[in-house]
Image (cartoon, rainbow, N blue to C red):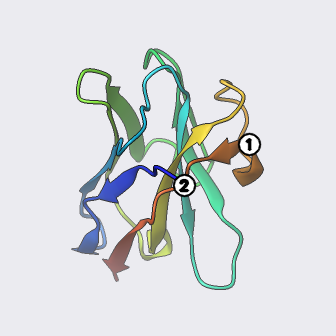
Amino acid sequence: QAQPVESGGGLVQAGGSMRLSCAASGHTLGGYVVGWFRQTSGREREFVASISASGGSTSYGDSVKGRFTISRDNVENTVFLQMDNLEPEDTAVYFCARNRFFDIRRHRPDDYNGWGQGTQVTVAG
């Protein structure tokens, strides 16, 4: 099954910035709401942000509001997550996926499919 490919993760100091990319691979992200989630070992996958198909509407989890920005380039078929003022608590594997209901207000992992392999983000305090 085709999956998106996440990239851009790595190690950063607290207070720093990082930009993640979610690129379509074998399937399109165009026309879909796309979301970012994150997960740490032993915990459920947590909603981070979602963006409408046009890019005109966005939604964010409470823990990242004001620090993270989701955007998309529908020509390049890529969705981005700009992360600023990073905190050690942001350390996780970050995933992107397509929303099954075309609704940015749906934030449960079960509302999404077509998950990528994830990219590790580590914030050193």
Residue 92 drawn at (x, y percent): 48, 73
Q: Which amino acid lies under the numbered mark 2 shown in the image of this protein?
A: Trp
Compared with 22, 39 (above or below) is below
Residue at image location 71% in from the left, 70% down from the top: 44
Compared with 40, 22 (above or below) is above
Q: Is residue 2 left or right of residue 62?
A: left
- Image label count: 2
- Which type of secondary structure does the marked residue at label 1 adopt? helix
Residue 110 drawn at (x, y percent): 76, 50
Please tell me the numbered disc located at residue 115: 2
Compared with 124, 64 (above or below) is above
Q: Quadrant of residue 103?
A: top right
Residue at image location 35% in from the left, 45% down from the top: 25
Q: Nearer the viewer, residue 114 or 118?
A: 114
Q: Residues within 10 Å of mark 2 (few under 14, many from 20)?
A: many
Q: Residues within 10 Å of mark 1 (few under 14, many from 20)?
A: some
Q: Quadrant of residue 115?
A: bottom right
Q: Quadrant of residue 105?
A: top right
Residue 30 drawn at (x, y percent): 43, 24
- Which type of secondary structure does the marked residue at label 2 adopt? loop
Residue at the spot of label 1? 111
Q: Is label 1 or label 2 in front?
A: 2
Q: Is residue 55 left or right of residue 77?
A: right
Q: Which amino acid lies under the numbered mark 1 shown in the image of this protein?
A: Asp
Please tell me the numbered disc located at residue 13: none
Residue at image location 70% in from the left, 53% down from the top: 109
Compared with 89, 60 (above or below) is above
Q: CA distance from mark 1 to mark 2?
A: 11 Å
